[in-house]
Image (cartoon, rainbow, N blue to C red):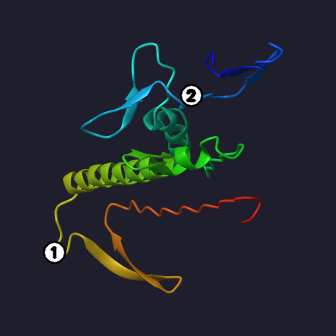
Amino acid sequence: MNGPTTIITDPHTGMTKKFTFDYSYWSHDGFTEDPVTKMNEKDGADSNYASQTDVFNDLGLEVLDNAFNGYHTCLFAYGQTGSGKSYSIFGYGANIGIIPMACSEIFRRVTEICDKDAEETKNKSPPAKDAKKKKKIDDDDQNEEKFEGGIKFEVTVSMLEIYNECV
């Protein structure tokens, strides 16, 4: 591997094929398990190993940044059986994948934005008798509380897995 390019050499003929992707990751070897965190980490400076965090930082954060900028986003994992799609998406054990990391990051950002909005709202206007609840509203048969400050988040995630050509 050399950056986003993966080079495969036929051991019998010596012929090579190059494949270039947006990202190309190595996760077969070159790692050790941290005894404390149980996370897989590079076993040395020369290692090409890409951790779950490396994959998330390259792919997951960009998808989340776009979602927080108002775009609908999609992350698509495609490849041959055993190539690591499920591991990258879900993870295993302490080595959580893109989806669990993204969920944690989504709610970290939501909390940060709401806390900032609440602080700005608090500093702008004097507290009312019932400063938090403004009124109840009925939206598509769901009762929701509307809070002063105006920021409301709705998080929707859907996933589809096709395994052995079956949905």
Residue 103 at x, y = what percent? Answer: 43, 54
87 to 8, vertically: above or below:
below
On the image, numbered disc 1 is attached to which residue?
Answer: 129
C-alpha gap between disc 1 and disc 2: 59 Å
In the displayed structure image, the side of residue 3 where residue 43 appears, left or right: left
54 to 164, vertically: above or below:
above
Residue 83 at x, y = what percent? Answer: 64, 40
Q: Earlier in the sequence, mark 1 or mark 2?
A: 2
Q: Residue at x 27, y 75 (%)?
A: 133
Quick check: can you spot residue 34? Answer: yes
Quick check: can you spot residue 69? Answer: no
On the image, numbered disc 2 is attached to which residue?
Answer: 26
Residue 107 at x, y = what percent? Answer: 37, 54
Q: Secondary structure at mark 1?
A: loop
Residue sitting at the far bottom: 141
Q: Residue at x 50, y 28 (%)?
A: 29
Q: Residue at x 84, y 15 (%)?
A: 13
Q: Amino acid at mark 1?
A: Lys
Nearer to us of marks 1 and 2 is 2
Q: Amino acid at mark 2?
A: Trp
In the displayed structure image, the side of residue 29 where residue 85 appears, left or right: right
Image quarter (top left, top right, bottom left or bottom right) of the C terminus: bottom right
Give whichever of 82, 139 is nearer the camera: 82
- Badge 1, how many Cα within 10 Å: few under 14, some, many 20+? few
Residue 60 at x, y = what percent? Answer: 52, 41
Q: How many labels sit on residues? A: 2
Q: Residue at x 21, y 56 (%)?
A: 122
